[in-house]
Amino acid sequence: MDKQRIEADSIGQIKVDADKLWGAATQRSLENFNIGSEKMPPEIIESIVAVKRAAALSNGNSKHLPKDMVDSICSACEDILLDGMWDQFPLSVWQTGSGTQTNMNVNEVIANLARRSSGLNVHPNDHVNMHQSTNDVFPSAIHIAAYNMIEQRLIPSITKLCKTLRHKSKEYKDAIKIGRTHLQDATPVTFGQEAGAWASAMDYCVEKLQGAAQDLLVLPIGGTAVGTGLNSPKGFGDKVCYYLNKDTGYDFCSGKDKFHGLSFKDRISTVHGALEVLAEDLNKIANDIRWLSGGPDCGLGEINIPENEPGSSIMPGKVNPTQCEAVTMVYTRVIGNGSTISAAAASGNFQLNVYMPVIAYSLLQSIDIMADVIASFESRCVIGIKANKEKMLCNAQRSLMLITCLTPLIGYESAARAAKKARTEGISLKEATLSLELCSEREFDRLVRPASMLNPF
């Protein structure tokens, strides 16, 4: 039988496996919230640990904690950040709405590590959690984790995709194809122009994400339980941010209105809104690509995409746009997470939002899967796109919408008659136009050229 030890808290005693570093609060949460398989994201744990280290340094600087205790807490935090120890942070997302049990899980693990290494009587509440509350620590950790993931993972993924799209735009700047509006033929474009629009969309998303992410730099740390800062020294939040910034190189600051920081999640909603715009634009690009590569024999077939794996268990030789499909599925998940965050941010009461674990889980999942799917999409699909220039030009030359370039000469109504005649009688646009005596053959040949329809006159 596994060995156990007895831990105690204000409720009473409880048994904990001897090899676990957590204490009574964590154990009670494990037993009371056996809900689902979703665990608190490791990025949240890392960010809480970072806050604990910064808080210990701040408390040491202000002489509220002795140096040896500060050193032991910081050493424990560094061990966790270095080694992970994820098996010591087992709690479900579906727990208290403030995230208190996860905050206490981190406090207990740090305290136990510190006690074991230093022999000091480090207490999870009195020392590791000194001058803090879950209510200001947990939302601060959400901001820290999300900002770091956006900066270190998501923005680089988007930037690389954008660079690849720009390369495709230049590579195919002369590949003429038919434009399409309403899924119907329109006037010609180049594939380079089409890919350039995709790249511009990604540029826009980077700009908006970076702007929205600035909201995450404002932390409610220092507000403690309800925003008043009760039981913390003046300027504590500023000192914590100082040490956080030394470690991260970022520019976190303690928000001026801690009441707002604890009770409202509008900053997170703003950030996730930018993520949703990114997901929407990527969904559009992925759908364009799978339409353009459709067929390849009985669809548009204007581009070829990499053949990564067999597409069917029954149809030999079939290849599917699976990377595009992954993007579109991630889009649906991100939009779902947005709905969850919106509902959660609109809820909570008075001085505290009590939906923070699900907000954290949803926000970080969106960032995580977006960063991953963009990297996969770029390296396994977009970079390998090849334009079928002949098919593109053939489609463009067949389109009756080329008549548009004659409208300045013959007028809209006459041009419409020519297009309708060509379609109804199954003849070429040139034959229809000349039979209606709308212009000379020389004028038609001079004006009706796809290459001359790519820019303003």
Image (spheres, rainbow, N blue to C red):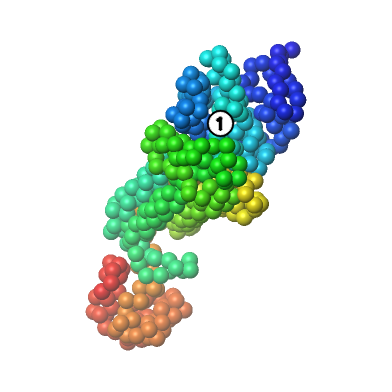
Q: Residues within 10 Å of mark 1 (few under 14, many from 20)?
A: some
Give the tally of numbered discs: 1
* Percent x, y of residue 422: 41, 78
Q: Residue at x 62, y 33 (%)?
A: 102
* Percent x, y of residue 172: 31, 55
- Residue that badge 1 annotates: 130
For the view shown, which residue lies furthest in the right direction?
Answer: 12
Question: Is 387 above or below relative to 76?
Answer: below
Image-based side of 422 in relation to 438, left or right? right
Image-based side of 231 in relation to 68, left or right? right
* Percent x, y of residue 277: 48, 55
Q: Residue at x 39, y 73 (%)?
A: 401
Front residue of 272 and 25: 25
Front residue of 379 and 92: 92
Question: Is 212 above or below relative to 185?
Answer: above
> Does residue 177 appear in this view?
yes
Q: Residue at x 65, y 46 (%)?
A: 354
Image-based side of 160 in relation to 351, left or right? left
